[in-house]
Image (tube, rainbow, N blue to C red):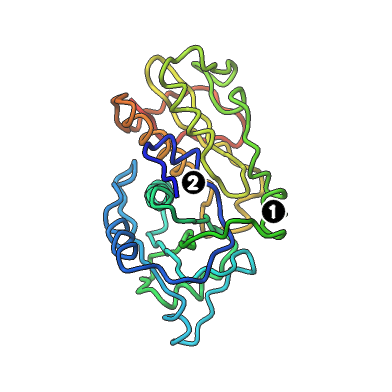
Amino acid sequence: MDRPNSIIEIIIKRSSRRNYRTEQLNRNILKQISNLLTSPPAGPFGGKSTFQLLHKSIAIDQKIKLGTYGFISGAQYFIVGKTVSSPEAFVDFGYRLEWIILQLTALGLGSCWLGGSFKRSEFAKLLDLKESEIIPAVTPVGYATDKRSVRDKLIRLGAGSKNRKFWSELFFDNNFEHPLTSNDIGEFATVLEMVRLAPSASNKQPWRIVKIGSIYHFFLQRTPGYGKIFPEIDLQKVDLGIAMCHFEMTAKEMDLRGHWKYLDPNISLPENSEYIHSWV
């Protein structure tokens, strides 16, 4: 199996996989996964959510069914993450779990972000979940089947998984009135393209970036009514963390130095938008 070497190759290769072979992972792979779960970098706000690998047998022993409402088939393992419930923590959670997922992709393993299509109460029974903690998302992990099932194809079609918004909808120059083009920013064009390819809940792609001078400001463009579906979990903040992970990892690989800083540019915002963070 050809495995990607660079983060750009990994991001391009990654896709959500919902059907898995039922074989067990060998000891070496399990050790590598275990190491990954304890080593993701801190998120842009410094949060340190925690992650755990669960095997279905643990749930069966405790008479618990790890339900995914039929979205996932064949998976024997799940990575479950928990964090405190706060706006910044959700961003950091998305950043850290996406880092893990990209490393899994590099190992030749399949994964799939599940933010709403799993039974949180069942997964929570297997974790030492404190009253202040919450499970924003989980992912199956294993060897994906070579062919996608009809159901998987329909889910991808319904979510528009292959479709991504145009640059003119996502990236802007100085304000939200002037779209940013790839010709304007040199090597950062690759960085933003990797952001454009980031996964998001229901493929809403709620991130927006405004470049002012040499600073890239991240904003959240909320989907009206989306937060009512899971009011206790801000999945679109999780999506921002995923996009920020793609941005930083690609920038670092290309030796485009910078860091995260809260630096609200106080520009006029479209409706349902809010400032998140900046890359300086």
**Front-lying residue, 107 or 7:** 107
Residue in the foreground of this view, choosing between 220 and 126: 126
Q: Count numbered badges in the picture.
A: 2
- Residue 209 circle label: none
Which residue is nearer to you in this view: 71 or 5?
5
Residue positioned 34% across, 41% down in the render: 44
CA gap, disc 1 to disc 2?
A: 27 Å
Residue matched to label 2:
237
Secondary structure of residue under mark 1: helix
Secondary structure found at label 2: helix
For marks 1 and 2, the one nearer the N-term is 1
| Vertical order, 8 against 106 (above or below) | above
Residue located beneath label 1 in the image: 153
Residue 171: quadrant of the picture: top right
Kind of residue sitting beneath label 1: Lys
Circle 2 packing at 10 Å, graded few (<14), some (14-19), many (20+), is: many
**Quadrant of residue 69 within the rendered picture:** bottom right
Residue 217 placement (x, y as % from top left):
43, 27
Could you say where residue 100 lies in the image, as x and y percent from the top left? Answer: 38, 52
Residue type marked 2: Lys
